[in-house]
Image (cartoon, rainbow, N blue to C red):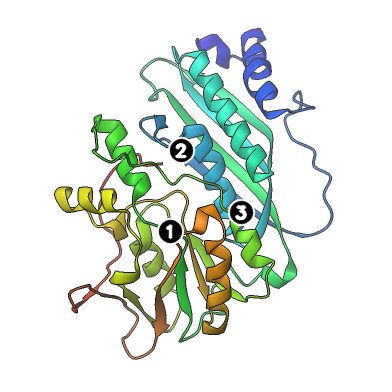
Amino acid sequence: MLSHGSGGRQAHDLIEKIFTLSFGMTTPHTDSAILDVSSSVMAFTTDSYVIDPLFFPGGDIGKMSVCGTVNDLAVSGAEPKYIAASFIIEEGFPVDELGKIAESMAAEAAWADVKIVTGDTKVVEKGKCDRLFVTTAGTGFIKPEFRHISTGRMIMPGDKIIINGPLGNHSIAILGARKSLNFKSPVISDCASLNHLIGKVMSSSADVHFMRDITRGGLAAVLNEILSFVRTGIVIDEETIPVDEPVRGICEILGFDPLFLANEGKVLIVAGEKDCREILEILKSDPLGRDSSVIGEFVEGVGKKAILKTVTGGRRIIDMPSGLMLPRIC
């Protein structure tokens, strides 16, 4: 009801019974979380989630909001620690569904070893938002030796590009759930927190030059973003790019390109050739990276372009995505 966003008794009860209880907050009656941390370099990120539908194969808006925040911090070389979460709720939204979403957030936060420590709740009139929107902010800490990772300044010709598994599962899972499509082979979203997987790589002797999570715009967007701050080109081998067969088949039918599809549990890692094998072994030893693959490298002599070597022996440029293939994917 609208009164749940009033700041009064009903708002207090909703926060206490849903969010405070789910997230295990011990001091919920302050406007700010007071965090006792040592002096350190901090990473900070924020994101909003408007996905439709709220529940999908492999997750829901709650799980995804935690995974997205955790992954944004982890690929910056940070150890994720704290999350704030704000909810804009449409009048009439079922409280039991809100409870399921909060429980999902709490479970994922516990798995990722982060704490949801503060937040806000607003309720708007029916028709003023589509059921539920979630906004998160997250903080983490970066060790001095990892400060270069988010800058990409260490990338050099010959560096290898690694991804931790198949592309496109999230987009196709959302498409199927939204349109009530019954795929012969179920497609599950890859929605997952990658900080533990990334932490294994970071704690090894391997030297990581850059990382980025592959979300909206897919692999194509990430590659073109990297080109904006490096002096080399990129060559990708299509044959080495993992794509699950159900996803590949649906893409062929609908005219989608897996390189442009969104993911919620994929990371791109750039490392030197001598460290590539060690990183690949670490990734493959984890369930979230068992299908990892080296898909390309940074090269000179091709200009600042991302080039795909196709399975048929040809070459084509991978452009920055334009337009909106599938709206409200996250």
> Relative to residue 138, is residue 31 depicted above or below?
above
Check contact, mark 1 vs mark 3: CB within 8 A. Answer: no
Q: What element carries label 3?
A: helix
Q: Give the foreground label among 1 and 2.
A: 1
Say which label, 1 or 2, has the lower sequence index.
2
> Relative to residue 222, is residue 178 depicted above or below?
above
> Is residue 7 shown left or right of residue 133?
right
Q: Can residue 141 be seen in this view?
A: yes
Seen from the viewer's position, the closer of residues 211 and 280 is: 280
Which residue corresponds to mark 1? 165
> Three-letter amino acid code at disc 3?
Asn
Which residue corresponds to mark 3? 195
> Is residue 199 shown left or right of residue 63?
right
Q: Which mark is residue 49?
A: 2
Residue 76 spot, x, y in % from top left: 59, 61
User: Between marks 1 and 2, how big is the CA–CA gap?
Assistant: 24 Å
Q: Which residue is drawn at 82% across and 49% down?
A: 37
> Is residue 144 shown left or right of residue 288?
right
- The quadrant in which residue 230 appears is bottom left
Seen from the viewer's position, the closer of residues 83 and 202 is: 202
Say which label, 1 or 3, has the lower sequence index.
1
Check contact, mark 1 vs mark 2: CB within 8 A. Answer: no
